[in-house]
Amino acid sequence: MKRQNRRDFLKLSALSAGFLGLAPGKLYAHESIEEKLNNLTASPKRQGESVMGLRVDPIEQVRIGIIGVGNRGYGHVKTLNALAPKAKIVAICDIRESRVTRALDLLQSLNNKKPKIATYSGSKDAWKEMVKRDDLDLVVIITPAPEHAHMAVYSMQQGKHVASEVPISFTLEDSWKLVDTAEATQKHCMMLENVCYGEEELWMLNMVENGVFGTLTHAEAGYLHNLLHKLFISSSDPEKRGYYNQWRLRLHANINANLYPTHGLGPVANYMKIGRGDKFDHLVSMSSLEASLHEYSPDSPPENAYYDRKNFARGDMNSAFIKTVKGRLITLKHDVVSPRPYSRINALTGTKACHEGYPSRLSLYKEDNGHQWLNEVKLKEMKEKYEHPIWKKMKSEAEQNGGHGGMDYILFYRLIDNLNKGLPLDMEVYDGVNWSVIVPLTKMSVELGSVPVKFPDFLRGKWKDERELRFFKNV
């Protein structure tokens, strides 16, 4: 790390100093800060056996318990129901009884009969009673993000496999708890990163695997999605589709970091085989000023908890720059409050090709030295030639069952099918925490003046082992 001068040190806030366990107001040598950061991200002693490539006994019909059937969960109920008889929804839990009732009504309309499903609601701990059931194989967690990790840990401790929405963890401590618990219990713990199953993303992954991009050098990813109005919705009216208890806005009020990194980063990590021959080494992060939230807040209803608020912590745009051990660079962005069209960026550069998403464009070195994007005819040829076998096989089925263009259905199909056959899953607990740990690491970097922060080694050195991606297996 580059040595900082006295003026840089004095810029460290009391919040940042406290975050690292340093006494506010005292000047520390740069080595002290670096040592603290390295200690925070060091790997603890393994408490079980690795779950790399974990196989369990085949489960003929996966019995599922769902925690959270609000906005996202309601859609997942339909998707999982479509996988019968490979899977069966046995129990549903939501703190709001109205959401449970709505999910049951959906199942009745889909199956033309009253569902025989156990229900849990009315208490913040009702989910624990559901998870203790003996007739569950898999717990699917679709709650506010800060709850994912502790629910996943508890579920594994009760002998259940876990599939959790994104991000799967928000702190370093929770990330290690997930890894340690999965290894101690030998249970699957997969983050439901649906974008890894997108048609464009799997097409690009197939091109990478077939050498089209050559040596990968750089990628750009992000989550750019204007949710400004939705963040402020506090009504319980399901038609308004706000976030329960405004949980997402609460994060913006208190944490200055990339709060939702995995949609853009997951596919890029697969392109670069992170955890399978390469590793995220360190990142540097910075946030812009905060403007959109406090300018919008006076337009929200006066009874809103965030009406006319000025002190939101989160800057409008957070950017992070990630370096891998092999020297690749990833630019990662997060902005959900600016008036810009949706984009995950999905850009990838290698020595032989370059791709940019939104809209999808491809340039090949062998075509005019890469000076032009391929025309529509040649782009179509490349898409047909390198269409991923998953999409080639399941396109009509995915489109019929929907969910973000079909990617949700393919995600759950792959998860359930591999459990049916006792095969390793496409994504492991290590992938989930590697992509989610961006949240606390960007927080550290931003608070300390955009200093480099090392990534934990959740695989404890095993990332060096070259491994095939499961996305090409059992198709």
Image (tube, rainbow, N blue to C red):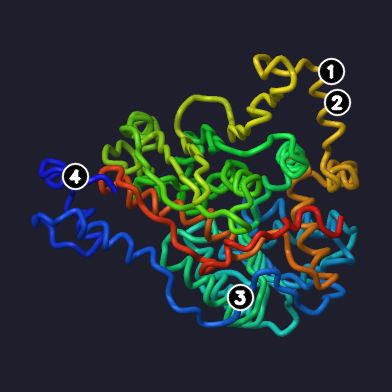
Q: Position of residue 16 (x, y in %)?
A: 23, 53
* Identity, as a three-letter code, of the amino acid under mark 2: Glu
Q: Which mark is residue 377?
A: 1
Give the distance between the C-alpha atoms of the residues marked 3 and 2, in whole angstroms.
42 Å
Q: Are marks 3 and 4 in contact (CB under 8 Å)?
A: no
Q: CA distance from mark 3 to mark 4?
A: 39 Å
Q: Label 3 belongs to which residue?
A: 50
Q: Quadrant of residue 121?
A: bottom right
Name the secondary structure under disc 1. helix
Residue 82 image-quadrant placement: bottom right
Secondary structure under the numbered disc 2 in the rendered image: helix
Label 4 to label 2: alpha-carbon separation? 52 Å
472 or 78, which lies in front?
472
Residue plotted at (85% across, 54% down): 110
Q: Is residue 431 above or below residue 303?
A: below
Labels 2 and 1 touching (C-beta < 8 A): yes
Among numbered discs 3 and 2, the one appearing first in the sequence = 3
